[in-house]
Image (cartoon, rainbow, N blue to C red):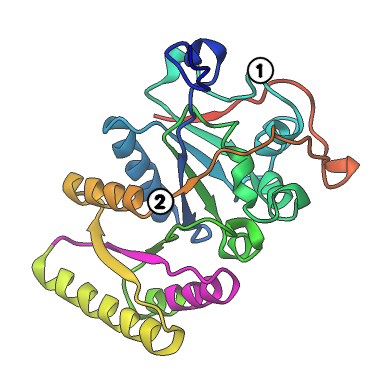
Amino acid sequence: MLDLSLHQGTSLHCHTPEIELRLTAVVSQGKDGQALETLWQVCSHLQRLGYPVVVLDGTAEESYEAPGLQHLLTNAPRGDGSFSMDSTHTSSLAVLPAFQGLYTLAFSPPHASQPLRALQPLFRQYALIVVYASVATFSTPLLKGTATAPLLLMQPGKPGVVTSYKQLKQLAIHTGLAGTVACMADSDAPARRREIDSELHTLRQCAERHLGQQIGTTSIYAGSARDMQRLALRLLENAGTIGVPTHGVPAYAAPDSQHSLNESYPPFYQRH
C-alpha cells in the first residue's frame, strides 16, 4: 500500500485545511456619527448575506471594564484559541475594542512581514474582519503585507473632498494602498447625486494627478437598502485575505504594566 500524506481520514486527525479569512479596513472619520452608523448597516447587510463579521474597533481602547483585542493576544480565551459569539447572539454584530491590540500587532517582531496574520487563529470562525481605525493607526506598519483597499466614508461638499484627499495621501505615503471612497449622500434626488458625482470626479482626478493612484468611488444614500447592499458587496470584494500562520499565535506582552488587562474572557458589545 502506498503511504499517502493526505487521505479520507485526514480531518479526523485535525488536519482539515483552514480557510483564509477576509480582512478589510475602514478609516474612522472622528466623531462623525453618520459614518459609524453607515458602517454598522453595511456589516449587518453582510451578515444577512451569510458572511459573519467581527469589527475590531481601533478607536476604542481596551480596559478592565471592556477588555478586547489586546486581551485576546495575551491570553488564549478557550481551548482552540478562537473567539466567537454565543449561538444566542448570532444575529448581533461582534465588536471588540482594539486600540492597544492593533498597535501591539503593528510593532510586533514575530509578524513583521504581515502583522495582521496573527488574527487568523483568533477569528477563523468568521468570514470577514473589519478593522475600523483612524488614518494615523493605519499609517503604522499594521497593513503591511495585506492587499486591501481601505474604505473612506466621505461627507458631501468641498470640506469632505479635502479631508478625503488628505487621508488618501496619508495612506499612499505610509502604506502604498489606494483607498475606496464612498460619499454619503444627504439626498437621493438625481440633481444631488449629480453634484456628488462631480465632487467624486474631482477627487479621482486629484488622486491620479498627485498620488499616481486610480481610486474607486461611489455615492450611497443611507435610506436606500440597495445602496447599502451594494457598498457591502464592494467592501467584501475589496477585502484582502489573511494567510494561515505557519506557527502558533505567540504570546504578546502588554506595552507597559499600567495597560495590562485582567485575565477574564473578554466580553464584546453588540450591535443589533
Q: Residues within 10 Å of mark 2 (few under 14, many from 20)?
A: many
**Circle on res. 260:** none
Q: How many marks?
A: 2
Q: Please state if 51 lies on the left or on the right of 226 as rendered.
A: right
> Which three-letter amino acid code belongs to the residue tagged 2?
Ala
Q: Give the magenta part as a residue range.
A: 164-188
Location of mark 1 (residue): 78
Q: Is residue 87 visible?
A: yes
Which one is nearer the viewer's eye here, 6 or 80?
A: 6
User: Residue 231: within the magenta?
Assistant: no
Of residue 19 and residue 225, the one placed in the foreground of this image is: 19
Q: Amino acid at mark 1?
A: Arg
Q: Picture coordinates of residue 49 (x, y %)?
A: 26, 33
Looking at the image, residue 5 lies above or below residue 130: above
Q: State the image coordinates of residue 266 (x, y, percent, origin top left).
A: 66, 26
* Residue beneath the point at 34% across and 47% down: 236
Q: Nearer the viewer, residue 271 or 127?
A: 127
Looking at the image, residue 141 sits to the left or right of residue 193; the answer is: right
- Residue designated by label 2: 239
Helix, strand or loop status at disc 2 = loop
User: In which quadrant is the C terminus drawn?
Assistant: top left
